[in-house]
Amino acid sequence: MKPSIESAALAVIMLPLLGFAVVGLLGRRLPRGGDWLATGIMGFVLATALMIFASVFHLNSPLVSIRWLSPWFDPRGNGFEWPVGILVDNLGAVMLVVVATVSFLVHLYSIGYMHGDPKYVRFFASLQLFSAAMLSLVLADNLLTLYISWEIMGFCSYLLIGHYFEKPSAANACLKAFMTTRIGDVLMFMGILILYWQVGSLRFADIFAAVASGSLGMEWRTVAGLLLFGGAVGKSAQFPLHVWLPDAMEGPTPVSALIHAATMVAAGVYLMARSYLLLTPEAFLTIAYIGGFTAIFAATMGVVMDDIKKVLAYSTISQLGYMMLGLGVGGFVASGYTAGVYHLTTHAFFKACLFLGSGSVIHALHTQNLSEMGGLRRKMPITFLTFLVATLALTGLPPFSGYFTKDSIIAAALEFALEHPSHWLLPSFAIVAALFTSFYMFRLVFLAFFGAPRNTHAYEHAHESPWVMALPLVVLACLSVYPVGGGVGNWFWSRNPAPKIEEIFDRYGPPSASLHGGGAGPEMAKGGSLASHPLELSNSAHGDSPTHEEKAHLAHQYAVAASLAVFLLGVGLAWATYMKRIIDAQKVAMRFRPLYLLLLNKYYVDDFYQAVVVRPFLAFCRKIAGFDLRVIDGVVNGTGWFTRFVSWLVGLHDRFVVDGLVNAVADAAAAGGRTLSRLQTGRIGTYLAGIGVGVVFLAGFMFWIIGSMR
Amino acid sequence: MILALLIIVLLVGAVLCALADRVDRRVVRWTALIITSVDLALAIGVATLVSQGPIVFRLPWLPSWGASLHFEADGLAALMILLTTVLGVVAVLISWEEIERRSGAFHVWLLLLQVGILVVFLARDALLFYLGWELMLIPLFFIIGIWGHEDKQRAAFKFLLFTFGGSIFMLLALLYVYVRHLNLGMGGTFEIEELAKTPLSASEQWWVFLGLFIGFAVKIPLFPVHTWLPDAHTQAPTAGSLILAGVLLKTGVYGLIRLAIPLAPQAAEAFAPLIIALSLIGIYYGAVVAFAQRDFKRLVAYSSISHLGFVVLGLFVGNAAGYQGAVLQMVNHGLATGGLFLLAGIIQHRAHTRNLEVFGGLWKYAPAMGAFLLFFAFASLGIPGTGNFIGELYVIAGTFQLHHTLGALAALAVLFAAAYSLKLFLSTMHGPTARPWRAFKDLHIHESVALGILCVGLIAVGLYPKLVTQPLYFPPDRLVPTTGRVPERVIRAEAARGSLSSVSRMRSKSFSLDHEVVLVSEASK
């Protein structure tokens, strides 16, 4: 069984890569730009992924790790060895199926949506490369290949956001997306290097073993965990770095569905789930708070957006925040981890459905503005129905998938808050965000599909999308229904697709030893109020189970009640506002104008970054460039000038002083010569007289010398 | 013999090009292309042979001075000559259309330039090294000065004076070691290996290293002595920029590895903090200044300063990871920045400007060119899959090993690299078209081939970095020249000198040359 999983996993990564090369290089010569090849490859990948999924679940062991390849880097010198491998465990298998499914459907959908685009071939090639990267990220058994895939996904995201690069907004959006996520990536890279130098390996198994044995200190775990989370904050658009995702909607809608809703942005959540054992209570709390805050923060902005894709973008950010919240409280409450990972899978399907549905609408109307839509349910029944199903899933009505997962996140947060009342904010975030969610989603549905068409011209030309676009919608809508999406073969729900945290502990040995061992004392004392540490769960879950279970049960009841209540409230408010017009949205906006403006301007976060980061950076760069030109190069050129100046001076000196002297000597000699030449008379008598005078003079001189010597 | 052939082929090629110039421009090009291709084949031969041990070629040259024509190729040298010859072929290809004036003379200089570079990479004799070092300057001086752009003569002179000024310090340092070696009764020789055995006191080493370092730092160029580079690059014709960025800058790093560190290992260690600081400053400084540039070539030139900062950083962090990363980055930078300069030249040839502010939306007109620029821009910011990622990974990992904070600083610089690379791509290829570039043609076949060669090289290194890191250990038992690990012979020499310097201090307070000579000769008895 194992070798077949191994080769299947390898094929899953390599085939899209091959597709990228073939479509990218030869796409123009292929009939229809090679879209059939790319889609076919993804279909095959989906089948393979399902097979892997089934095989992994046939094995009793919940984790299957396959080590593969090693001599990639030169092993010499300080043990610089980075083996590369593939890891297929339950988490990976689930992600594999999710990614392959959405990617295949998006490929299919794009055949219709991108039809006639001048950059059709490039689009499919990029999608292939992206799929390869995302699949290899899911299957990575070490942080290095994970990081590599992570970066390549960022590159594809850049390309695809900038697909319509003639538009300045798209060109800027892709730059912004890449730079913003890159900030997170650098943090993550540092975290990886810290782990490398502390552990000596980047394989998850080795890192977890170091955690279990206690050789990786608590402080390094916190630092590295938070740095990794920094990467996740960038990629999953969490609070301080969320600004790129709404702008990323400049990309074609299938891209938004695949990359910026279902898969790539979930990679951050996946990374956190993957490196779960590394994290410490401090890290968990940070994750929970950032996630919870993001959930409510983004949901409020979704309320006022007019662009259909922007609403969905903020919804995505908000839902990613939910997942982070789930994972964060999962450090303290057993169900949180499963809930977070679950929400990732269900969200992928219904959010992809929503985005593709919005793409269908945009395709029909050629506008993204809600203010120009309306009444579309009659013109586009399939789109409407699937969109409605996905909306119900997102907002959390019981038979639909989102209800179960979001509810369990709220329940986990509540349970945590029941045990530690000081953290009451976390469940409040989750519940209030759910209220906003159901409001803005139904606002979207009512505005787009109900009422009278606001732009009759566009409405008249609207039509249902072709089957390549409708089919993915239907499939995704089916997957958003619990009995279908959750029920097929009982895989998605009851057979625990996401590994329970206890199983991970079973796998890597009793971790509590590391905590009660040396070095962990102060942290434990500080975290005392947090009572149960994540790694103690396996023990404590059995120990004081009555109160635990009671609380869990209680929390679950509260959560069900709360989420249903806010669902109804949200729907009712939206209905009253946008269907019955009992509440006038415009008046409300006027009444709370500052608040409305605050939301409309996205809390001025973008402007803040512009003013505090971007513009100062640009100014700084220009300053330094000026410094380089004027000061450093100035010194050089100045030296040059100075040298020339000195040479000039020397030249003057040479001409007037040195040359002058020489000339003076010459002149003197010449003058002397002229004077003396007069003596040359040619008469012998004069010469003789001269000789006589000379002899007398010389004789006198000699006598004087001899005399003086005595 | 193959080493001599490498050089002889180029020299013969230069003569042939000069002759072919009387026939036709096309003949010149083809001659140059064939010659450089033959040289590339020879270099590949060297690279394969070198795994079985170093290749040596030695002829007497100036026996009375102890100088010989000593060429030797080990793994590092083989990598460097491979890089040189690859870029040599690319340089001929890219000059195909660009050089219209005095084509024969241009190719003669181009081939002679490679001769100089190859001599530097292969020489194991200090005098020969110096000869090659100066030989590199003259051809490039003429290439910039004659075939360059608007402000070519000033740039050419600046380049010449700067590097020549630096190399004087280098020559002085070399001569000092030579004289010391001679006066110590160890015989007059320019063999680098012999010179490295000269026992030098700490202060002597300090001065020797400083002299060599100044010479090499100008060439690399390191932070405060870099300003000749943007001018030279901007004004040089494309092939000149390519060779300048691709290999010429590496001769500086190579000199540090081959001369400065072996001749003065302790001083190298003492200087390491300063050099690390300078290279870190250079990394940031180059990136920040690059971001503010409006001239395509100047932007790339400043990015070179940033990248070379990484190389020097890796070299001086004093561990194997850093050293491997430094060499990887030398190769990658040669390929990636070479590619960017090619594109700069190609775009300038079509648009007659390098001003980034008037470009925009070019991808629409030139899909292949856009794809290449995308690739090289992302290579330059270190995207995985290209060699640059691996190189930066190694350097940063090495820096991390030395010090976590320094490593974090080096890692953050990657962010700045992304800023200027994306700016470059955005302002040329993305966005609306600022001007009607209707006549803008996509790549010619020879341009695609030239760029393709560089692309393949970068991907090969990125996917299989062993291509570069493995040869570094040829011959197998070679020590990685890390500054942290002082070779044993130096320690021995130092131990011997320790007792001597105390004696000499008793006799005279000044460390005059004569005193020590006497002392050493006494001690040797």
Image (tube, coloured by chain):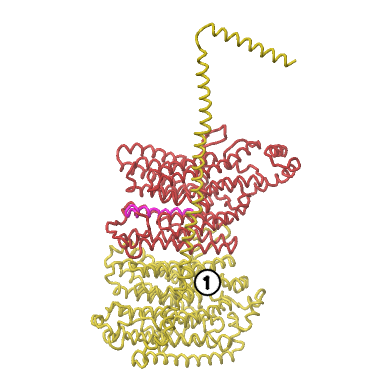
Chain colours: A yellow, B red
Judge whether residue A47 can be spotted in this image: no
At horizontal 48% and vertical 81% (from top left) the residue drawn is A340
At horizontal 37% and vertical 57% (from top left) the residue drawn is B355
**Residue A375's quadrant in the figure?**
bottom left
Q: Decide whether residue B128 is among the magenta residues.
A: no
Q: Position of residue A437 (x, y in %)?
A: 42, 85
Q: How many marks?
A: 1
* Quadrant the C terminus of chain A occupies: top right
* Quadrant the N terminus of chain A occupies: bottom left
Q: Position of residue A626 (x, y in %)?
A: 47, 57
Which chain does the numbered disc 1 sit on? A
Q: Nearer the viewer, residue B63 or A315?
A: A315
Q: Position of residue A193 (x, y in %)?
A: 55, 65
Residue B525 vertical placement versus B464 (above, below):
above
Magenta region, main secondary structure: helix
Q: Position of residue A3 (x, y in %)?
A: 45, 70
Residue occupying the far top of the picture:
A685
Q: Amino acid at mark 1?
A: Leu
Residue B286 lies left or right of residue A259; in this view the side is right
Residue A41 lies left or right of residue A299; in this view the side is left
In terms of secondary structure, where does tag 1 sit? helix
State which region is magenta. Answer: B329-352
**Residue that label 1 marks:** A228
Q: Nearer the viewer, residue A501 or A377?
A: A377
The crowd level at tag 1 (other Cα within 10 Å; few <14, some 14-19, many 20+) is many
Q: Nearer the viewer, residue B164 or A315?
A: B164
**Residue A243's quadrant in the figure?**
bottom left
Residue A370 lies left or right of residue A669; in this view the side is left
Judge whether residue A533 can be spotted in this image: yes
